[in-house]
Each structure stands twice: as C-alpha cells, then as structure tokens.
C-alpha cells in the first residue's frame, strides 16, 4: 500500500493501482453492481485527454515537455492498455466525475513513470492542474460519451447491418422466381414472390443503416470547452474547437464544438434521439427474425416455405427436432436492447438545471445495446440468413390452394360474386376453379390465365 492525498485528505492505495486517492474513495463508495464502464468508453475518454493535452500545448497552456508525456500515457490507454485501472461501478456520481478523476490520476501517474524512465527533468505531472487543464467532468464525460457511442455505431453496428443487408438482397435475387402466397393478419392474402418478400427485409436493413448514420450525426456535437456549466471558465479561448478538430482528424468523423454549451451539458437529448433511432433498428431486426421463423415453421406441420439452417439439437426429449434458435436469439437481443434504450430515454428526462446526472448509466446502456445488437446481427447473418433455402414446391402448393386468388376475379365478376365464389369454395372444400367452371362464369383458358399467381405479383413472366 502507498499513501496518497487529495483535497479531502490521505488515502491508502494498493501499490499495483495506478489511480490515486479520489478514485480510491469512489472504489470504496460505490460497490454496487460490478458493472464498469465499457472499454470503448474508457478508450474514448483517453482520446479526449490526449487531444486536450495537445490542444493546451498549441494554446500555450502546457509546456511541450509535459504535454508529450500526458499524450503518450493517454494514447496507451486509448490503444487498449491499462483498462483494468478503471474499476469504478457505473452507479457512481451522475456526472461521471469519479471516472474523469480516475483517468486524470492514471494518466498523471503513467506520465510521471514515462518521464522517469526517460530521465526527463520536469516537475511531477498533476492530475488536475495538467491532465485536466481547461476541462471539467461536466464537459469531458459528455464528450467521451458522444465520441465513444458514435464510434461504436460507425465501426461496429453499421458494418454488421451492411453485411446483413447484402445477405438478404442476395436471397431476394435467388428467390425471385418463386411465387408464394402473401399473408396479412397471418391469414391468406394475394400472391407475391419470395424474392419480393426478401427485398422488403433488405430494404428494412438499408433504412436501418441510414438510421445508424443519423444517430452518428446526432452525436457529432461535442461539449468539450464548456467546462463546469457551459461558460468555458478556465479553458483557453479556442480550446474546445481545437480538441474537436483533433478528434475529427483521428476518427474521420465530423466532430465539432457544440453550438450552445449550455444545451450540450444540461441536456442529453441527442442520446435520447439515438435511442429512438436504435429502437427502430430493433423493430426491423425483430420483425425479420420472427418472419423467418414463421416461414420456416414445420417442417411438416407448419408453413414450411423456408428451410432454416439446423445449428444444434432442439430438444432433450424429441429426437431429430431442430428449432429456429438464431431467430430466437435475435428476438431476445432485441428485447434486451429495447430495455436498455428505454433506460436511456428515461435518463434523458433526469437532467436538472445545468447538468444531466445519469451519464455513466447512459454510456453503459447505449454501449451494451450497440454491442449486443452488432454481435447478434453478425451471428444471425452468418448462421441463419446465408444458409436459408426455399421450398419452392411447398410455396407453390400453398399458393395454389389459397382462396385469395379470387381477388383477381373481382374486376371481371365484381366483388360480391367473387366473395360468394370464395365462400362456396371454402364451405364445400372445392377449388376456385371448380366453382367458377361449375357455374359457367368463365371458360377454362381465360380462368387459368386470370388465376395464374405470377400474374398477380407484378413480375413479368419469363420469355
């Protein structure tokens, strides 16, 4: 153990820990859930600290010698090192001050170690005076929140959705010639092709990608430069803009200083917007997953239009049974993510006056929702969608039996007579063709042409 000090006095800290007294107090104060802020958030926080040191050097607020070691230490953390040095529970001070202090203390200690290793002659790097120069937890933590979530959306969820869209579009192409019966309200409707049905799924995911893009855009305004309450007290003029420019340069995303720092720190409306956009993505994924397991139900007593890949035994008592486990997995991921996103929306209502005090929980919920959705989508694509096969014979058989082909007779015979034909066929267990011919309403050749399911899909018949 070693003795450390902060503004409240002395604390004993384990020698193996790089943090100092204030972080140790938070370790002791918040033994709540065991959930810590995700690595992506900590790495983004370190990126902010590196950019801040570089900007302060540019503005003459930090000597180059000190800035160099702060940047080097922060870059190690941004690269994934020392993540175990960030042990704090997400249920802590709502501003994330404890986590900001944790970063300041760890970076300061690492910077001092790096300086000592290089025999540099300079005063000790101070966690508050140098690492936190021109900053407050109240602008740093919202900045790290936006930065980390935008990167997670851009580099993790968006590529997963792009792969899923490609797989669905390919199935749409392969399934284009297969005519099947449509269903509304889970009841027979008019025909369409299986390719058309899958084109709808592909379009849903295309729009989901666009929603993720809008979510990234919503997060590109950063709070850095506002310090405690948005006035920028103790930050050098131009500091926020320089930090944002540096973060934009290194990530390739259009980060920029907030137009209004009071809004950027007092409200978390951008995160609520992101939660809403992600909720729509969850809706798309769940719809598709549920449709695929319905269309693949059976294999002999269900719809059976699709054959889903068998990935594992489905029953401990029924031999040979397989289940649509990938759809079930994605549905559960969606339910979990939806709950997290509802928490984000609730957090957005919890801001009072100049600060929203739910920042660690916001960060955890958004990151875990994105992580699970991205992983779920990747697995669903690889182990379900790419291996789906169509049972063309079953599609044709179900389509031929459907009474809703009668819809094509309406322009010729009228709605009431067409309805009577359908009701008679259902009541007497006859086909539409049998009823129409028995009544002498149309000749066989004309009837067969009108009742051809392909002609009802809007798809041109093959030449």
Image (cartoon, helix red, strand yellow):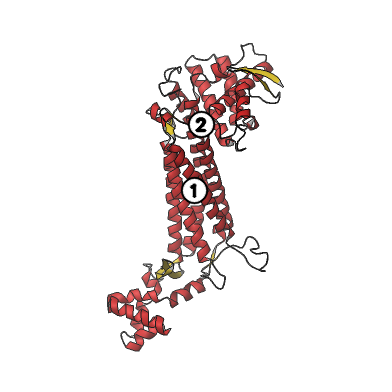
Q: Is residue 92 left or right of residue 428?
A: right
Query: How many labels were placed on the picture?
Result: 2
Locate residue 120, reporting x and y percent: 65, 13
Q: Position of residue 138 (x, y in %)?
A: 47, 26
Query: Is residue 267 visible in this depiction of the protein?
Result: yes
Residue indicated by mark 1: 338
Q: Quadrant of the N terminus?
A: top right
- From the viewer's perspective, tell me whether residue 463 is left or right of residue 119: left
Q: Nearer the viewer, mark 1 or mark 2?
A: 2
Residue nearest the viewer, comparing 208 with 271: 271
Say which quarter of the image contains residue 422: bottom left
Residue at image coords 57%, 57%: 326
Q: What residue is disc 2 on?
A: 94
Please say whether residue 81 is visible from this viewpoint.
no
**Cα–Cα gap, marks 1 and 2:** 22 Å
Find residue 251 and report its horizontal and vertical position in percent: 50, 33
Viewer-nearest residue: 149 or 1:
1
Residue pictured at 39% horizontal, 70% vertical: 189
């Amino acid at each position: 153990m070693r003795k450390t000090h902060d503004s409240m006095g002395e604390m004993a800290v384990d020698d193996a820990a790089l943090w100092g007294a204030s972080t140790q107090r938070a370790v002791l104060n918040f033994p709540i859930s065991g959930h810590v802020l995700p690595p992506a958030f900590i790495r983004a926080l370190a990126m902010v600290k590196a950019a801040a040191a570089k900007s302060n050097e540019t503005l003459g607020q930090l000597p180059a010698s000190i800035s160099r070691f702060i940047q080097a230490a922060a870059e190690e953390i941004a690269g994934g090192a020392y993540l175990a040095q960030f042990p704090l529970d997400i249920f802590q001070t709502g501003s994330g001050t404890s986590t900001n202090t944790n970063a300041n203390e760890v970076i300061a200690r690492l910077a001092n170690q790096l300086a000592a290793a290089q025999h540099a002659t300079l005063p000790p790097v101070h966690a508050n005076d140098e690492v936190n120069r021109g900053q407050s937890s109240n602008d740093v933590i919202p900045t790290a929140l936006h930065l980390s979530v935008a990167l997670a959306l851009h580099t993790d969820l968006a590529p997963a959705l792009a792969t899923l869209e490609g797989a669905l579009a390919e199935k749409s192409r392969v399934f284009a010639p297969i005519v099947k019966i449509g269903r509304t309200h889970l009841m027979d409707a008019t025909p369409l092709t299986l390719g058309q049905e899958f084109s709808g799924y592909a379009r849903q995911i295309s729009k989901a990608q666009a929603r993720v893009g809008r979510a990234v855009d919503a997060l590109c305004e950063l709070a850095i430069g506002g310090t405690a309450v948005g006035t920028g007290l103790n930050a050098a003029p131009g500091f926020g803009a320089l930090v944002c420019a540096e973060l934009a340069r290194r990530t390739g995303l259009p980060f920029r200083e907030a137009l209004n720092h009071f809004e950027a720190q007092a409200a978390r409306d951008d995160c609520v917007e992101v939660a809403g956009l992600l909720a729509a993505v969850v809706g798309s994924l769940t719809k598709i997953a549920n449709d695929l397991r319905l269309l693949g139900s059976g294999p002999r007593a269900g719809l059976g239009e699709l054959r889903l890949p068998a990935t594992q035994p489905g029953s401990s008592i029924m031999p040979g049974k397989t289940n649509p486990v990938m759809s079930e997995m994605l549905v559960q991921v969606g339910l979990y993510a939806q709950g997290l996103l509802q928490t984000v929306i609730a957090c957005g209502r919890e801001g009072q006056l100049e600060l929203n005090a739910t920042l660690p929980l916001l960060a955890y919920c958004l990151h875990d929702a994105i992580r699970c959705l991205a992983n779920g989508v990747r697995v669903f694509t690889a182990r379900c969608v790419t291996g789906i096969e169509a049972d063309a014979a079953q599609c044709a058989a179900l389509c031929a039996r459907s009474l809703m082909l009668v819809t094509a007779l309406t322009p010729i015979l009228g709605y009431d007579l067409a309805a009577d034909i359908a009701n008679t066929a259902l009541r007497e267990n006859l086909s539409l063709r049998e009823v129409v011919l028995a009544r002498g309403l149309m000749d066989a050749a004309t009837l067969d042409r009108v009742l051809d399911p392909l002609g009802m899909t809007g798809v041109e018949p093959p030449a």
